[in-house]
Amino acid sequence: MDFFVMTGLTLIVFAWIIQLLEVWKLDQKINLWFIFFYALGSICLVIDSIISKNIDVALFNLLTVVFSGIIFAIILSNFKNKKK
């Protein structure tokens, strides 16, 4: 497997492990680190898809990065607003 595919999938699995540990603690919130590692993994998959000229796969993975970024920004914004 290609470096970016392995790195991307490893980061996504790591993100799911983080989220699973949160759920086991009965905390229903999405962990910020989950979103971070999921987005990083998806970025690696986008890079690999572009290098491999799989533009359709790259676009779908890019969508996951965009949605992850939006959720990350919302959670971070809510967290900052609660501290005020």
Image: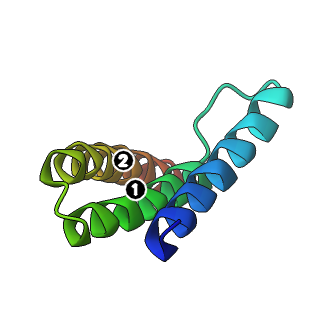
Q: Amino acid at mark 1?
A: Ser
* Disc 1 target residue: 42
Q: Nearer the viewer, mark 1 or mark 2?
A: 1
Q: Amino acid at mark 2?
A: Ser
Mark 2 and mark 1 in contact (Cβ < 8 Å)? yes
Give the x, y percent position of residue 38. Answer: 50, 52
Q: Quadrant of residue 10?
A: bottom right
Front-most of 5 and 74? 5
* Disc 2 target residue: 68
- Mark linked to residue 57: none
Who's the residue at 40% across and 51% down the image? 72
Front-most of 82 and 8? 8
Specify few, some or many for label 1: CA neighbours under 10 Å numbering under 14, 14-19, or 20 or more: many
Give the x, y percent position of residue 13. Answer: 65, 49
Is residue 84 in view from this perspective?
A: no
Front-most of 10 and 64? 10
Front-most of 66 and 58? 58
**Left or right: 84 in relation to 28:** left
Against 67, residue 37 (above or below) is below
Local SS, label 1? helix
N-term mark: 1 or 2: 1
